[in-house]
Image (cartoon, rainbow, N blue to C red):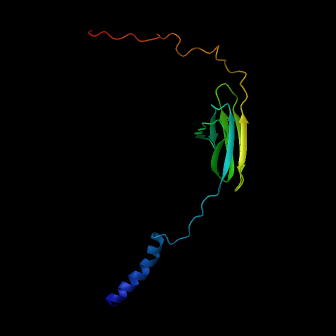
Amino acid sequence: MTVQAVRVSLLLLSVPWLAALTGCHPQVPPTPTSTLVLTVSPQSSSVLLDEQPLLIRSTTGGPARLRLAVGPHRLEVRALGHLSAYRDVDVRAGVDAAVSVTLRPDPDAESDASAPSPTLGLPAAVPPLPDKL
């Protein structure tokens, strides 16, 4: 076998590897998404989506708009002094899903008046240290 024949053989063997490494393979289609329009009350509520906390910022107090993958999702809404609420949401492609959650007060929660003060028993100000010990 000649040197040229060996080079051609090596080139032909390396073409599939080069194709695989350079991206000559089918593209994975993007995951379809849609919008969830979420309104919660009280506004200080914590929201979990599929057991992961969400950071929702709304300066206007209006509903939050979340871009989610199409399919089933689980919402959990919590707030101090309120009963937690759960919602199962099925997000469909091209259709906004609207969810409104208003938490009910927890009758067993302590009211603010009967709750112990976090500063109870602490001095109002710490006295300054002396200049010399």
Q: Nearer the viewer, residue 18 or 81?
A: 81
In the displayed structure, would residue 32 be above or below residue 113?
below
Location of the C terminus by quadrant is top left
Residue 24 image position (x, y, % from top left): 50, 72
The residue sitting at the bottom extreme is 2
Residue 116 lies in what quarter of the image? top right
Please, which residue is most extreme toward the left here? 132
Report the side of 2 relative to 35 (left or right): left
Query: Which quadrant of the figure contains the N terminus?
Result: bottom left
Location of residue 103 with respect to 114 vertically, above or below: below
Residue at 71% x, 31% y is 103
Q: How many marks?
A: 0
The correct choice, above or below, for 48 with respect to 23 in the image is above
User: Which percent across, then down, holds residue 18?
Assistant: 44, 74
Question: What residue do we see at 39% from left, 81% from top?
Answer: 10
Residue 92 position by quadrant: bottom right
For residue 21, side relative to residue 30 (left or right): left
Residue at the extreme front of the image, as rendered: 60
Identify whether 53 is placed above or below 82.
Answer: below
- Where residue 114 sits in the image (x, y, percent)? 64, 13
- Residue at the (39%, 85%) spot, across then down: 8
Q: Foreground residue, 57 or 50?
A: 57
Estimate the x, y position of residue 34 in percent, counting from the top left: 66, 53
Name the residue located 64 percent from the left edge and 26 percent from the top edge. 80
